[in-house]
Image: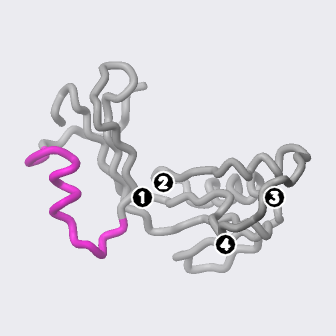
Amino acid sequence: MKPHGRPIQLDGTPLQLLARLSPTTRVLMLHSGRVHRTWARYTLLGFPTLTYQFDQAGQSQLHGAAESFKGTGDPFDDLRQVCQQYDKGIWIGHMSYDVGRWVETVPTQAQADRNWPVMQWGYCPGYLLYDHLEST
């Protein structure tokens, strides 16, 4: 995959840039500490303005949006709807193991002792993609 955008020269590495940012700057980072030509060539720094979250109770929330968001109770439908509405940047996030409960019926053996989101995604209209091989 060839990333889109334009190359810029950074004064340092992504980790050095991250260290120079204000502690109040919201940043999402995908980074591998070990560069590999095929598997770990890029570092992505995203600066989220919105956050989509689906919780254990089956509720969707969109934080930071001007308008309210009414979820359907299906994390995939809700995420699809949000991504279609905000499509000028990139979404960076994660899905927990528990998202499988919305895909198939699985037995509940573990106690629900964490209040972690089932999925959480940040919308980043601005982001940097650093190529470790090209240093750009």
Are dots 2 and 1 in contact, CB under 8 Å?
yes
Kind of element beneath mark 2: loop
Kind of element beneath mark 3: loop
Given this view, does label 4 or label 1 mark the residue nearer the observer?
4
x and y, in percent, of residue 106 in the image: 88, 46
What is the quadrant of the N terminus in the image? top left
Mark 3 residue type:
Asp
User: Which of pointers 2 and 3 lies earlier in the amino acid sequence?
Assistant: 3
User: Which of pointers 3 and 4 lies earlier in the amino acid sequence?
Assistant: 4
Mark 1 residue type:
Pro
Are dots 4 and 2 in contact, CB under 8 Å?
no
x and y, in percent, of residue 108 in the image: 86, 54
Q: How dense is the environment of label 4, judged by Cα within 10 Å: few (below 14), some, or many (20 and up)?
A: some
Q: Which mark identifies residue 61?
A: 4
In this picture, is 21 found above or below 68?
Answer: above
Distance, label 3 to label 1, CA atoms, is 25 Å
Q: Which mark identifies residue 27?
A: none
x and y, in percent, of residue 10 in the image: 13, 46
Q: Which residue is mark 1?
A: 125
Q: Which residue is mark 3?
A: 74
Mark 4 residue type:
Gln
Q: Which residue is mark 2?
A: 88
